[in-house]
Image (tube, helix red, strand yellow):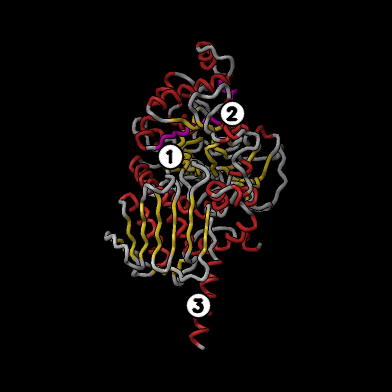
Amino acid sequence: MNKFIFLFLTLIAFKLSAQEVNLIPLPVKLEIKQQAVPFKIDSTTAIYSNDPLTYSSIEFLQDYLEKNYQIKLKQYNNPDINRGNVIKLIVDKKISTHKEYLLNVTDKSIIIGASSDTAIFQAIQTLIQLLPPEKNTVLNIPALSITDYPRFAYRGMHLDVSRHFFDVAFVKQYIDYLALHKMNYFHWHLTDDHGWRIEIKKYPKLTEIGAWRNGSIIGLWPGQGNEHIKYQVLPTEVKITPKNAVIKTDGIRHGGYYTQEQIKDVVDYAARRYITIIPEIEMPAHSMALLAAYPELGTTPDKKYEVAETWGMMNKYNNVLQASDTTFKFLENVLTEVMALFPSQYIHIGGDEASKIWWKQSAVSQQIMRANGLKNESELQSYFIRRMEKFVNSKGKTIIGWNEILQGGLAPNAVVMSWQGEKGGIDAAKQNHKAIMTPENNMYFNHGQFVKEDSLAANKFSPLIDVYNYEPIPAELTAEQAKYIWGAQGCLWSEYITNPAKVQYLLFPRLDALSEILWSPKEKRNYPDFQKRLKTQFKRYDLMGITYSKRYLEN
């Protein structure tokens, strides 16, 4: 009788364990083997692969298990198919697609098969989510089988390190977060008005001068033109009007930059996690840090520039580069060093928020326009972008730019990143150009997650449900045009994000929503079910020491 009760309870436990499989993003196909005995990971478990290219996947899993469960997974090279208690990673070119993986769990083994080492790594992220989300538990993996592959080829996340600098250790941690969510592109925003963060050996003043500012804005974030003023980072709600608005800075020197050796280290770290880093070097605007170091490249006659201490006022400050041969040669030299550091096929050159008034007021700019038959400043912007694209293409690379690069005519081979709504992405797709969708209202994670947000975020609202329900392919595109929607990206601008905990707070769980948008089949998306699965994910955040809003647990 006791034996019967024990077996009954064991079967119930196995069934409950199977019911608690909560994966984010959802796989294409999941079959749970009800009442089957789970696989147990312990100190005797071994891992085997038939391809050395998968050793990065093995290392990632080993590190995760050791850090969070204090279990050291043993790697072995003997392909003994009869050995029990083993995790096998098998690269098999016969598996149908390069991106697909198969994961099968029995009581004796976990077998992951794919035709590429990239897909093997994505399967490892699924396996990690099958682990119990708490410490001091038996590491039972429920018996199941999964067939899975991503919906979109570009699954991106961005980090702005110009407004506030984050050290190498945290950037690596950030990359790990992306890897765990099956993201494959990291858009690294390295330069802006507020700091130049990458060492360029030919132009040392970029980091000697451009990497440092003498203060950061506190108190207010003005609207464009000051016609409406928003308060921010105030202890209480204070009515602000244009008449009494005061912009203050804290007077604290802020800065930092990455050496080229550090850049190489981070690029290698990301590559081992199958993440491509796309560097962004802003031009022709958002260039005050550059101009503070090399003022001769600007449009102001007096050539007086400082690294910006405030933000949100693109028309107030002249931060636009002169479209001269001197400027182009300077930028070509910069990009030559950048491209040597980043193996990415893609180089982001910004192109956004270039206030045309500075070119309009510059006699030199007007002469350049006349010499090149340009009718207006929008065509001058297009001329600037096309010049830089031609150079980047000559090095075998492709440019990405924010949707403003469409102004005056799109460069021949450019990829458009659409942030001002979807129109830029739609126009690009209709012109047979790749587009990445990152509309501000849905994909800017520096916005508040709740109606009443604290000083952790910009004073805008992007709730989790709006992120989750976003569909990257606009309905107005035809099936053929929709093929040019390469994917989507979340952006994290750091104006009000001063430390890693704030990054985590704003990133999670919106990164989970983004991962499901970009990986899972569209028809599988279900917000109430996603909320249910998030509860398990929050336990995993607790295990990993990640900061997130406890308000999500109230629902």
* Secondary element at tag 3: helix
Left or right: 337, with 413 as reference point: left
At x 51%, y 24%, the residue is 411
Neighbor class of circle 2 (other Cα within 10 Å; few <14, some 14-19, many 20+) is: some
Inter-mark Cα distance, 1 to 2: 35 Å
What amino acid is found at the position of numbered circle 3 in the picture? Thr
Nearer-N-terminus badge (1/2): 1
* Secondary element at tag 1: loop
Q: Which residue is mark 3?
A: 10
At x 37%, y 54%, the residue is 57
* Secondary element at tag 2: helix
| Mark number displayed over residue 147 | none
Q: Nearer the viewer, residue 292 or 384?
A: 384
**Viewer-side label of 1, 3:** 3
Above or below residue 193? Residue 361 is above
Is residue 330 in sight in this rendering? no
Is residue 536 in sight in this rendering? yes
Answer yes or no: do the residues labelled 1 and 3 have beta carbons within 8 Å? no
Return the residue found at the far left. 78
Above or below residue 149? Residue 359 is above
**Viewer-side label of 2, 3:** 3
Inter-mark Cα distance, 2 to 3: 58 Å
Q: Which residue is mark 1?
A: 197
What amino acid is found at the position of numbered circle 1 in the picture? Arg
Above or below residue 469? Residue 544 is below
Answer yes or no: do the residues labelled 2 and 3 have beta carbons within 8 Å? no
Residue 356 magenta-drawn?
yes
Q: Which residue is mark 2?
A: 430
Image position, residue 438 (x, y; %): 57, 40
What amino acid is found at the position of numbered circle 2 in the picture? Lys
| Chain part drawn in magenta | 344-359
